[in-house]
Image: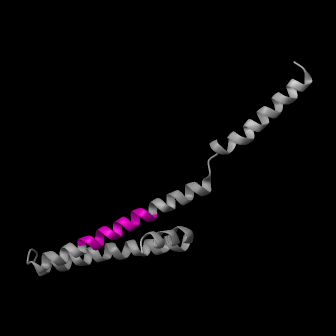
Amino acid sequence: MTLGALVALGLAVGAATFVLVPLFRRDDAADGAATATSEIQDLQSRHDMALGALKDLEDDRATAKIDDVDYDALKSKLTAQAVEAMKELDAHARTHPSIAKRRRTENP
């Protein structure tokens, strides 16, 4: 092989490496944001489920499907779950403000 061919081969390998390495490199910042987004979605789902269950509980009480003792116990439990999910969502909003902002615009 000639010197020119070796230089061309070296440049080709260098260019290929330059282009391909970012495709295979793991981006920890993106992984952290994806994890935070997943956790926030999970918390939002837990909060929404607790609120839905509270609404169902109110409907059951209005139609006399549940007595006052059971209603009070279930309402306390579901309210605590909803509040806990909200507190965790607020904590995530402080640590990941860009994700929290995006969540507010997606779920007004």
Q: Is residue 9 left or right of residue 4?
A: left
Position of the N terminus, as image quadrant, is: top right
Q: Which is more toward the observer, 2 or 66? A: 2
User: Relative to residue 8, is residue 34 depicted above or below?
Assistant: below
Per the picture, the main secondary structure of the magenta-coloured stretch is: helix
Q: Which is more toward the observer, 69 or 106? A: 106
2 falls in the magenta region: no
Q: Quadrant of residue 19?
A: top right
48 falls in the magenta region: yes
Q: Quadrant of residue 94?
A: bottom right
Please state the total of marks drawn on the protein image: 0
The residue drawn where x is 23% and y is 77% is 75
Where residue 92 sits in the image (x, y, percent)? 50, 70
Residue 70 seen in the figure = no
Q: Is residue 71 left or right of residue 34?
A: left
Q: Magenta span covers which residues?
A: 40-53
Where residue 67 sits in the image (x, y, percent)? 10, 78
Where residue 10 sits in the image (x, y, percent)? 82, 31
The residue drawn where x is 55% and y is 60% is 33
Q: Is residue 13 left or right of residue 92?
A: right
Where residue 91 sits in the image (x, y, percent)? 49, 73
Q: Which is more toward the observer, 75 or 102? A: 102
The residue drawn where x is 34% and y is 66% is 46
The residue drawn where x is 62% and y is 47% is 26
User: Relative to residue 32, is residue 61 depicted above or below?
Assistant: below
Residue 47 seen in the figure = yes
